[in-house]
Image: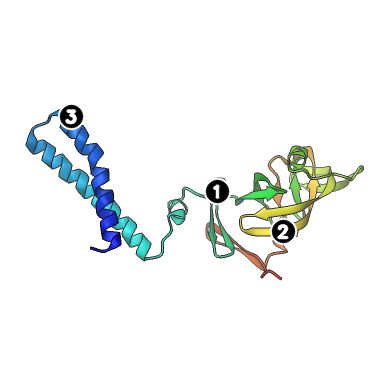
């Protein structure tokens, strides 16, 4: 018996203890108890076989939620794969100077944008007293300019990303000034794939 076989046998035995003790406590007829015990053993055996097959085929547990549509992001090597959200857009978890926030990816936006509240929380200094007029989907507005020292999207790290800051930007958006720094970005069906340039 190799190490894996012994480990799985021990796990199966441990997982059977709880349902078997529950069945015995209910004092069911021995025939019913044996049938239910066999059913539980079959369920756990199938689960262990599935985990074993996944291990031998290189499937990671972290990939399962993405495959089932329960997670929106997956890291593959140095690439970030983002699933399209039910609202039809692509959203990514972003870390701005260590402050984490979910942001919309908008290839139609020239500059990445955040709200004033996010700028404060992320420690982004806004030193633009006058601001600039920009055109948005909601019409023209005045936004102030700032720079994020660290702007990380998944495993992709960027420095000194210019930002537009205004109260109405809400959760913010990732614009072309970030996307243009990548080696490539593309949409394949319901997935957006971001690939960074090789580290210099």
Judging by the rendered image, the residue that carries numbered circle 1 is 85
Q: Percent from the top left, x then y, of residue 89?
A: 60, 50
- State the separation of the CA atoms marked 2 and 1: 24 Å
Disc 2 is placed on an element classified as: strand
Instruction: Give residue 49's quadrant in the image.
Output: bottom left
> Closest to the observer: 111 or 87?
111
Disc 3, disc 2: CB below 8 Å? no
Residue pictured at 70% horizontal, 60% vertical = 179
Instruction: Give residue 131's quadrant in the image.
Output: top right
Q: Which of marks 3 and 2 is in front?
A: 3
Q: Nearer the viewer, mark 2 or mark 1?
A: 2
N-terminal label among 3 and 1: 3
Estimate how packed mark 1 is, as few (under 14), some (14 to 19) or many (20 or more) residues with alpha carbons within 10 Å: some
- State the separation of the CA atoms marked 3 and 2: 60 Å
Judging by the rendered image, the residue that carries numbered circle 2 is 158
| Quadrant housing the N terminus | bottom left
> Closest to the observer: 137 or 160?
160
């Amino acid at each position: 018996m190799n190490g894996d076989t012994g480990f799985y046998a021990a796990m199966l035995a441990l997982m059977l203890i709880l349902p078997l003790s529950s069945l015995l406590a209910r004092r069911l007829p021995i025939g019913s108890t044996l049938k239910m015990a066999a059913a539980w053993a079959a369920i756990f055996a199938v689960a262990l076989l599935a985990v074993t097959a996944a291990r031998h085929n290189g499937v990671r547990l972290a990939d399962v939620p993405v495959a089932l549509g329960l997670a929106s992001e997956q890291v593959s090597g140095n690439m970030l794969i983002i699933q399209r959200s039910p609202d039809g857009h692509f959203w990514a978890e972003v870390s701005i100077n260590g402050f984490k926030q979910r942001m919309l990816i908008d290839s139609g936006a020239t500059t990445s944008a955040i709200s004033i509240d996010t700028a404060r929380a992320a420690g982004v200094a806004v030193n633009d007293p006058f601001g600039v007029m920009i055109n948005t989907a909601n019409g023209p507005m005045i936004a102030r300019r700032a720079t994020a020292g660290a702007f990380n999207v998944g495993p992709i790290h960027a420095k000194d990303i210019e930002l537009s800051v205004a109260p109405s930007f809400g959760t913010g958006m990732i614009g072309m000034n970030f996307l243009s720094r990548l080696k490539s970005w593309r949409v394949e069906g319901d997935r957006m794939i971001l690939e960074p340039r090789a580290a210099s």
